[in-house]
Image (spheres, rainbow, N blue to C red):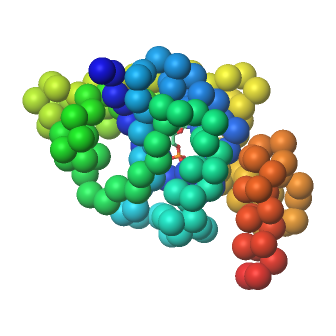
Amino acid sequence: MSKAIYPGSFDPVTFGHLDIIKRSASMFDELVVGVLVNNAKHPLFSVEERTQMLEEAVKEYPNVSVIAFDGLLIDYMKEHDISVIVRGLRAITDFDYELQIAQSNRKVSNETIDTVFLTTSIDYAYLSSSIVREYASYGTDVRAFVPEFVARRLQDRYQSK
Ligand code: ADP
């Protein structure tokens, strides 16, 4: 059975992420979306909130699950018998970093893990969670970028700040 993991911060999930999820879910028997707990950034949404929004957004896909993980991605993958990482590539600016991570993950996993890159759909090439947060913080309507329930969560979060 083919199993892949799509890791990221998802702060919050956008239509760009959902496009990658939809496309990779049709390539693997099982897709796990992994929400990073332990990253250097100070997220707008807690890991529970990010996970819960993703669960809501992917509920139409029976072979997609959402988990939160702490620590090293490849350790989680070994424990759960996952050998493929999915990442999205938007622009050349993503490439350097992604190449470095993919190569080092391959090395430290003794060449048991591979990374598959999906190029962004042209409609979402400019889209990132940080751009969405920036617009939402000024009260701009972000429903073109994220599902409606995520837009509401953003509005609530910034109104209460
Ligand atoms: P990270 O903090 O790990 O970059 P993100 O949540 O920003 O986490 O992104 C997770 C993954 O989704 C990354 O592989 C990123 O390149 C990809 N991604 C983000 N936005 C888009 C988009 N608009 N189109 C395609 N891929 C995207």
Residue in the foreground of this view, choosing between 68 and 42? 68
**Would residue 88 be visible to someone looking at this image?**
no
* Residue 120: % across, % down: 62, 25
* Residue 29: % across, % down: 41, 23
Based on the displayed image, in which of its 4 quarters is residue 112 positioned? top left
Count how many numbered circles sit on residues in the image: 0
Residue in the foreground of this view, choosing between 111 and 83? 83
Compared to residue 77, the image places residue 9 above or below, namely: below
Residue that appears at 63% across and 36% down:
60
Residue in the foreground of this view, choosing between 143 and 122? 143
Residue that appears at 43% across and 33% down:
31
Compared to residue 131, the image places residue 28 above or below, namely: above
**Would residue 4 be visible to someone looking at this image?**
yes
The quarter of the rendering in which ligand 1 is drawn is: top right
* Residue 45: % across, % down: 59, 67
Residue that appears at 68% across and 30% down:
125
Pick the quarter of the image with the C terminus.
bottom right
Residue in the foreground of this view, choosing between 64 and 131? 64
* Residue 143: % across, % down: 84, 48
Compared to residue 86, the image places residue 148 above or below, namely: below
Outermost residue, left direction? Answer: 110
